[in-house]
Image: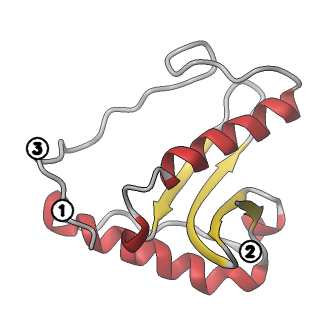
Amino acid sequence: SFRLAGAADLAVMRAITERACAVWLPVLGYAPGRWSLTISRIAGGKVLLACDGEMAVGLVEAEPGAVRDLVYSLAVDPGDAERGIGRALLAEAERRAAAIAGGAPAEPGAAGFTIVEMEKPLSATSPDPR
């Protein structure tokens, strides 16, 4: 299930992002940039949580824009990886953005989307998150 994050979720959100970043450190060779989980973004309804029961297992931080939406961060707890949570979070964020805009979601690469190349390619095998 999905729900908007509240101020009480800040600690668990930081824990999820730190664990998610730690998994990729050996692959990237550096720590990903510090994510800006802020009370103002949470209060503004810009952080969506994926929950397994009552427990948050992932998050997406997105901001609707006039032309396109911007995803600031996406993180899934490594213990819950490979369950489609990240994909589901992005789909739900897109669905909510489309509902606000009054239209159907666009296809990636269509007008309104910007595709950004990764700074450094990942190795052929990603680390085992478990």
Going by the picture, which residue comes out furthest to the left?
124
Graded by Cα atoms within 10 Å as few (under 14), some (14 to 19) or many (20 or more), the crowding at tag 1 reads few
Q: Residue under label 3, please give it.
A: 124
Marked residue nearer the N-terminal end (1 or 2): 2
| In the rendered image, the vertical position of residue 1 relative to residue 99, given as above or below | below
Residue at the location (76% across, 20% down)?
A: 104
Question: From the image, which quarter does the C terminus lie in?
Answer: bottom left
Q: Are marks 1 and 2 in contact (CB under 8 Å)?
A: no
In front: mark 1 or mark 2?
1
Residue 97: x and y in percent read 76, 36
Q: Residue under label 1, please give it.
A: 127
Quarter occupied by residue 27 = bottom left
Mark 1 → mark 2, Cα distance in angstroms: 31 Å
Residue 78 versus residue 32: which sits nearer the camera?
A: 78
In front: mark 2 or mark 3?
3
Residue at the location (37% across, 55% down)?
A: 82
Quarter occupied by residue 128 = bottom left
Q: Residue under label 2, please give it.
A: 39
Residue at the location (75% across, 85% down)?
A: 8
